[in-house]
Image (tube, rainbow, N blue to C red):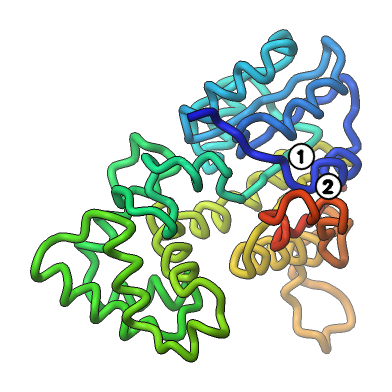
Amino acid sequence: MEFRHESVLLNEVIENLNIAPDGIYVDGTLGGGGHSFRIAERLTAGGRLIGIDQDEEALAAAGKHLAIYRDRVTLVHSNYENFSAVLQAQGIAAVDGILLDLGVSSYQLDNPERGFSYREDEALDMRMDRSAPVSAREIVNDSSQEELVRILREYGEEKCAVRIAKNIVAARQQKPLETTGELAQIVRHSIPMKMQEKGGNPCKRTFQAIRIACNRELEVLSDSLDGMIDALKPGGRICIITFHSLEDRIVKNAFRKNENPCTCPPEFPVCVCGKKPKGRVITKKAILPGEAELEHNRRASSAKLRVFERI
């Protein structure tokens, strides 16, 4: 299956990165290389682009897509949580721009071998890095009922979390759950029809939650943002595209904290904590896809772009 993924908010990202021809840029979620191609074409021979992805199939596709710019592009198989180590290995102390596109690629969603989709009956997997030890199968079959409830509530904001978790545990006592179809059937039987009629596909929140848990997505994002901001040169920017409220909240709060880190009580006349701003939030409101983009890419509908600039 060909790796394909339509880059979301492409023009908005390129505009907000303020690309310098001789700058150093990092795409921490390379995917098929759509955003990176547009970055690389704006660089001169003195510029560099480091592309990071944990999906080896994405790296292979991006390598082909970016082959024309191989003189200025370095691809690394890793998770962006290892951002600092990747830069150190490349002999880079600071960068001019960083991009994170936190969406799941169309290839991952549509490829039956990857086990992301609730629309097909395929092996439960959901790993973005297929060499990772924990897949969705382990999450579903090995987690306690209490842990499943926490995952579904925290990562999927699922109102029927208790009923779904209880039914998962009951089903796996008969035999381990092996496929997305088996999981989807349990979810559908757990959610009242009235709720299903109003809320779109009833499996969406559960599959999102298990995917997030499987790939530690929110943990990695939370733990990485401060270090990425610290790695920016003065005037450098970090652009982050999120696709659900949990990610967006983490990004928004991290940007605000780095813009105004003071922890002094409001009544203090002057700051005594000594914490200084690291930069400024460029996007007071998130940038959303325009109508033209939404017309030809429905998966862009939930995308939000936020931008922070180092001082």
Q: Position of residue 99 (x, y in %)?
A: 72, 41
Q: Which mark is residue 310?
A: 2
Question: Judging from the image, what secondary structure is the residue with disc 1 in?
Answer: strand
- Amino acid type, residue under disc 2 in the picture: Arg
Q: Report whether 250 appears left or right of 301.
A: left
Q: Position of residue 218 (x, y in %)?
A: 52, 59
Rendered position, 190 above or below 5: below
Whether label 1 touches label 2, CB < 8 Å: yes
The residue singled out by tag 1 in the image is 232
Residue at x 89% of width, y 21% of height: 21
Question: Which of disc 2 and disc 1 is earlier in sequence?
Answer: 1
Rendered position, 29 above or below 66: below
- The answer for how far apart the CA atoms under marks 1 and 2 are is 6 Å
Question: Judging from the image, what secondary structure is the residue with disc 2 in?
Answer: strand
- Amino acid type, residue under disc 1 in the picture: Leu
Residue at x 68% of width, y 24% of height: 92
